[in-house]
Amino acid sequence: MTRRIAAVVTAYHPDERLAAVVESALLSCDSVVIADNTPGDAETLAGKLQGPKVTVLRTGRNRGLAGALNLGLAQVPADAEAVLFLDQDSVLPPELVAGLSAHLADEKIAVVGPTPVDAATGGRYERTADRHAAVDDRPSIITSGMLVRRSAFEDVPGFREDFFVDCVDSDFCLRVRRSGRRVVRDAALVLPHSIGSGRDHRLGPLNVRVLHYPAWRHYWIARNGVVLSREFFGTERGFVLTNALFMARWLLVTTLFDERRAASVPAVLRGLLHGLTGRVDLRRYLPAGAEYQGPEGR
């Protein structure tokens, strides 16, 4: 069965990879919507890609990842039966969309995604991925490469803008599961994706991969992760346990290896505290040019 699929691509100060992403999406999707989060009035590469099947949306503000996703989703054509979400660096392998779409033959499946691999090294994000079934139910999958059945948005209208950037994918998937629908990952389908500014460090006999982020990213990762653990503790115990272990490791490796630990460690700790108390600190932990769509910060 052939489905009409629209792609939503989020962009932020895009480089030439965006053109390759759009070109690859047009080979297997009926239309592409680019939601460009780049602040300011200057034209970016995204604007040059406008065409009969490509819609470019710009507000001149950084609305955060969730804001961009929602902006693009609102412009998806009414006849699209599924929506494919992509980052600006995720060039689609030719067989990927067809492989993902085939899973939607199961009416219970609302969200399906591939296994993301590091575009630089080819390594899988999840090092224990081989321990899972080839196609398995997951508490969450990353946004880039996520194919969502259009009807799923009737129960889960969109992405959580008060999270700004981090954990937006996890929150969406967890709410889909809470609605009674399935979120699955196909390990046989892979999507190259930039894993960020990661570097390897030695810790005794161990090789530790560490992502070096600015302090504001550390804050949102910690805060939003704790918020999700609080909200889904009763129904997603496996996710909550895994998330707790992730947070503990995140704090440890940031303390040991981050060159900017004087700013990063307090950001993690403050994020953990605000996740528990429901607060948000917008004065310290928003990037320049950002527009926050959520409850007022304190």
Image (cartoon, rainbow, N blue to C red):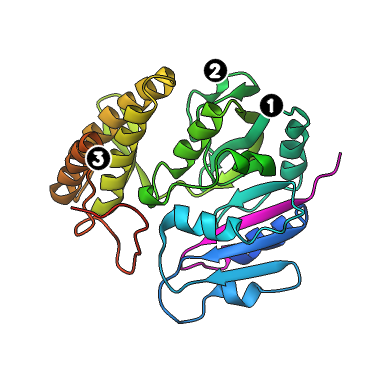
Question: Depth-wise, is mark 2 or mark 1 nearer the camera?
Answer: 1
Marks 2 and 1, how far apart in space? Answer: 24 Å
Q: Residue 185: give x, y in percent of width and height.
A: 61, 30
In the rendered view, would you say 87 is above or below 244? below
The outermost residue toward the right is: 1
Q: How many marks?
A: 3
Q: Is residue 206 visible?
A: yes
**Residue indicated by mark 3:** 278
**Residue indicated by mark 1:** 108
Q: Which mark is residue 151?
A: none
Measuring 74% from the left and 34% from the top, which residue is drawn there? 104
Q: Residue 100: give x, y in percent of width and height.
A: 71, 37
For the residues labelled 3 and 2, say whether their Cβ atoms are less than 8 Å apart.
no
| Element on which disc 1 rests | loop
Q: Which mark is residue 131?
A: 2
For the residues labelled 1 and 3, say whether their Cβ atoms are less than 8 Å apart.
no
Mark 2 belongs to which amino acid?
Arg
In the rendered view, would you say 274 is above or below 204? below
Marks 3 and 2, how far apart in space? Answer: 35 Å
Magenta span contains residue 2: yes
Q: Quadrant of residue 49?
A: bottom right
Decide which of tag 1 and tag 3 comes sooner along the chain: 1
* Mark 3 nearby-residue class (10 Å; few <14, some 14–19, many ≥20): some
